[in-house]
Image (cartoon, coloured by chain):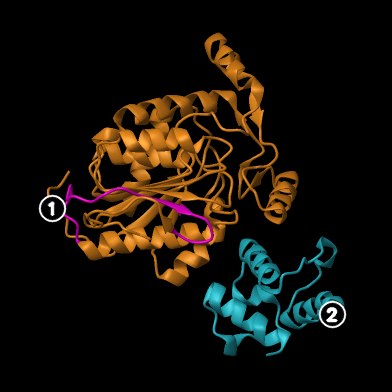
Chain colours: A orange, B cyan
Amino acid sequence: MHESLEIANPSLLLFHGLLSSPQEFGLVTNPLKMHGTAHHALSTPGYTAGNGETILDWRAWQKNASAVVGEQVANNQPVILGGLCIGGILAATVALEKRHPIAGLVLISPTFTYDGWGMSLIRHWRHIGYWTGLDHFFSVAEREPYGVKNPKIRKWVRQELEQRALSAAGPTKVPLRALREAERMMANVRQRLGELDCPLLVIHSREDEITRIESVKQLFDDLPLRNKELVILENSYHMVTIDNDRRQVADLLSRFVKQIGDQNLTVGSSAVITECHTPAETQATETAINPIFNPC
Amino acid sequence: MNTLDEIKNLIHTTFGIDTETLKPDQPLSAYGLDSLALVELLFTIEEHFNLDIPDSRGDITNLTGLAKLIDELRSPQVV
């Protein structure tokens, strides 16, 4: 990683969730535009629905995702990587490769483990599928609440899934084999995230039904990284980019991009972790000592 | 401010479209609003006017129709 990065207006590159589509960022596109924040919701061969044949191998996802990022990086201008759900884990694998000039990483509703309240009881059986190879033949169907707390948006997602088998909240079903690859990728990132040396923003909802906030907070606290920030949203479920807090997510992304662009950060400069609980709006719960990233 | 002007302002603040260019009888799609943006607009309008636009009224295609519907939905609340 470069010792000192002169960063001007880094572009924000976003990866959607497992085998879904860039449409997951559809409802934050305009708010980001209104902020003047340049961003791209990326489509990755073998990972994005409808972008070539689906590949069920996370190393291939990483390789293709890295190539897609490479196409976006112009004359070594640093970029900020980010992603929703497994897309955040994918973004982290690319950042950890250290092949591209990465100015920052954003993890939105990162799925580090499947332990949320919305996980069906049979989730423990998935390991049997993994071990026996039966995961080739099974899929996991998307179901209520589709990661969405807002009833009107949830109804819209349900209608989309009925009409198109793909919605702003993801596909109607995911092969169990893809889930296994995603869990392998998660394990890799959980192990290596401490090697990250660029600023990190984590956005997670207290009521996330896929991964409990406690799990995310535990991993966040254990990170030796100093430039890190965790924002806990109070009025959404897992799909925060299309749920009640979607505008808040756009505000947080824009602010993170600007903070990195304005600060001309020297990689590894000290900052403090600020954990913000955001009821209606942002509210600090820990005192910032030397806030470079004090959002509250 | 009448309902039509309120809607124009909402479209401006949400999508950055200049209110001068918003013609009441022009289809909403003429402003480059894709299906997702139209969904966002409907959610924004519902939150702003604090009302529920029934699915059955998906026939709305321009600002005049939208303003008329909103006035209909609001009028019982005014009584």
Which residues lie in the magenta part? A264-282
Which x, y percent locates residue A252?
Answer: 42, 58
Question: Which residue lies most toward the left here?
Answer: A3
**Image quadrant occupied by the C terminus of chain A:** bottom left
Please indicate, yes or no, whether residue A93 appears anywhere in the rendered image. no
Disc 1: host chain: A
Please tell me whether mark 2 sits on a helix, a strand or a loop. helix
Left or right: A296 with respect to A126? Answer: left
Which x, y percent locates residue A47?
Answer: 49, 38
**Image quadrant occupied by the N terminus of chain A:** top left
Disc 2: host chain: B
Left or right: B20 with respect to A223? Answer: right
Which x, y percent locates residue A5?
Answer: 17, 55
Is residue A48 shown in magenta? no
Please indicate, yes or no, whether residue A68 appears anywhere in the rendered image. yes
Residue at coordinates 33% horizontally, 39% vertically from top-left? A94
Q: Is residue B60 above or below residue A60?
A: below
Rendered image: mark on residue B75 = 2
Going by the numbered disc 2, the residue's amino acid type is Ser
